[in-house]
Amino acid sequence: MKHNVIACIPTKDTAWLLKDSIPYLLKFCNKLIISDDSSSDNTKDICLSHERVIYQKRPKREHGDRQGALQRQELLTEAYKHDPDYFFFLDADEVPSPSIIDWINSLKPRDIE
C-alpha cells in the first residue's frame, strides 16, 4: 500500500455486512478500527478473525443514548496511534466504489515541515 490509510467504522449489529466489507477495505487500508456499539450478533468474531482489524467494544448504554460524536472521537484517538497518512471514516453499511483504490494511490504525499 502506497499510503498508510486507517479506516474508522462505527457499527452495531452489522456482522452480515462486515463479513464482506472487511476483506474489501483491507485491500487499501492498513488497519480498520471498528467501534462496536454493543452488538448482539457476531460482529466481534468477524472483526477478530482479521489480523489488521482493531476491535473496540463500547460500554452498554440506555436505549436512545447514541453518543455518535463521542464514538467518532474514540475512533480518531485510536487511529492516531497508527501514524496514518489518511483517515477513512465510513459507516458499516457503506461500501466505497472500486475506483477508490486508484484514487488513494494517486494521492501525493504532503510535504510536512
Image: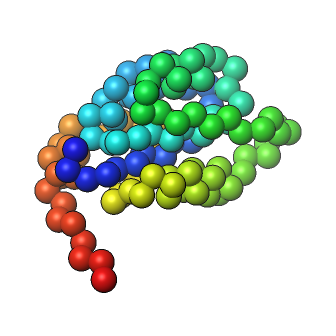
Residue 46 in the image: state x and y as whole percent: 51, 19
Residue 34 relative to residue 6: left or right: right
Q: Residue at x 24, y 72 (%)?
A: 110
Q: Residue at x 63, y 52 (%)?
A: 74
Residue 91 in the image: state x and y as whole percent: 49, 42
**Total of numbered circles in the picture?**
0
Relative to 11, residue 103 above or below: below
Who is closer to the viewer here, 73 or 11? 73
Residue 51 in the image: state x and y as whole percent: 43, 27
Color style of the picture: rainbow
Relative to 29, residue 72 above or below: below
Residue 40 relative to residue 111: left or right: right
Residue 42 image-quadrant placement: top right
Q: Residue at x 31, y 30 (%)?
A: 24
Q: Residue furthest right?
A: 62
Residue 25 relative to residue 45: left or right: left
Q: Residue at x 80, y 35 (%)?
A: 60
Q: Is residue 91 visible?
A: no
> Dividing the image into 4 quarters, which one contains the C terminus?
bottom left
Residue 110 relative to residue 8: left or right: left
Residue 2 in the image: state x and y as whole percent: 20, 50
Who is closer to the viewer here, 3 or 62? 3
> Dividing the image into 4 quarters, which one contains the N terminus?
top left
Q: Is residue 79 visible?
A: yes
Q: Residue furthest bottom?
A: 113
Relative to 94, residue 42 above or below: above
